Amino acid sequence: MAIPFDLNDLLAFRAVAELANFRKAAESVHLSQPAFSRRIEKLEQALGVRLLERTTRRVTLTAVGREFERKVRELLDDLDSTLLGIRGVAATRMGEVTIACVPSTVYYYLSEVIRRYHELSPKVRVKVMDAGANEVLACVARGEADFGLNFMGAQEGELEFKPLGEERFVAACRRDHPIAKMRRVSWAELARHDFISVARSSGNRVLLDQALAGVEHRPQSIYETQHVTTTLGLVEAGLGVAAVPAMAMPGPDHPLLVSVPLVDPVVTRKIGLIRRRGRSLSPAAQQLFDLFMTLRGTRSRRPRGAGAS
């Protein structure tokens, strides 16, 4: 059976029930007063009951009108919630998410999370901004990225830091290098070999310089790169050894590279997600953010000596 009124009629009735004034109610739904009155009359005729009592000064609900108004309010609220839910689902299936991250997290960690995210939302375009730790902070703070993956940020007042885990620095070397046979290696031992480091502008370099300030015999670099990924490329080429975050290392099945835990001292860094404080994410970005939190503590390919990351 066809319903003899439509959604616009219900919206008009809710407006007059809330405002108790025909003129104000008509203005709120962008109708002339005669057109608005016809909508209310149409609704009352369709229901066969009087919903409103009108006087020259005031509009009040009848007993039936009060009960009907409660039902209409519940109906329209449910409809609003349903539409918002549908829009949210659609937004997570289409659109774009931008994440800023330090390069050492990209190849063997971020790529796995993005792969799983693509299975959930294959139409969402993911843009990765790989940059130094300070630039990652700046990108998130400026709103150029939805959120970031970093090992700095807990002290930034405008950003909030959600920890994912803590990982240690390991020695990276070729499988045919003498260090590869050791269960652990000290920084002093590492200093006896050709050493490859990242530049002083790198957040990892700053962290290591602070942690090794009291170490008498520490590695001195022969080669210097801008990013950990480049450092590993030189290690793979046989040019030396390096100290890198465990997360940056390939898994134990890599044909050339291996990692060995570094000790005396053990140096760690905390990895986490950063986002602007008090700002909500889009549904698509929130879904990726939540996936990071769900997958924390897991990694499909964990290198020897890796910490929880």
Image (cartoon, rainbow, N blue to C red):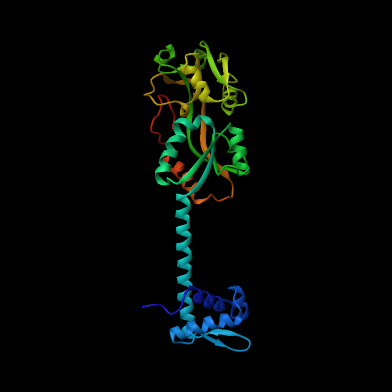
Looking at the image, which is closer to me, 115 or 162? 115
Location of residue 234 with respect to 104 vertically, above or below? above
Query: Does any portion of residue 265 appear in the rendered image?
Result: no
- Does 201 sit left or right of 288 as displayed? right
Looking at the image, which is closer to me, 270 or 76? 76
Residue at point 53% right, 76% down?
A: 14
Q: Could you say where residue 97 lies in the image, as x and y percent from the top left?
A: 51, 44
Query: Does any portion of residue 306 appear in the rendered image?
Result: yes
Q: Could you say where residue 150 lies in the image, as x and y percent from the top left?
A: 54, 35
How many numbered callouts? 0
Residue at point 52% right, 33% down?
A: 270
From this viewpoint, which residue is outermost toward the bottom?
Answer: 55
Residue at point 52% right, 23% down?
A: 230
Location of residue 146 with respect to 102 vertically, above or below? below
Residue at point 60% right, 44% down?
A: 143
Looking at the image, which is closer to me, 22 or 222? 22
Q: Could you say where residue 5 lies in the image, as x and y percent from the top left?
A: 46, 78
Location of residue 63 with respect to 219 vertically, above or below? below
**Quadrant in which the C terminus is drawn:** top left
**Quadrant in which the N terminus is drawn:** bottom left
Q: Could you say where residue 82 lies in the image, as x and y percent from the top left?
A: 45, 63
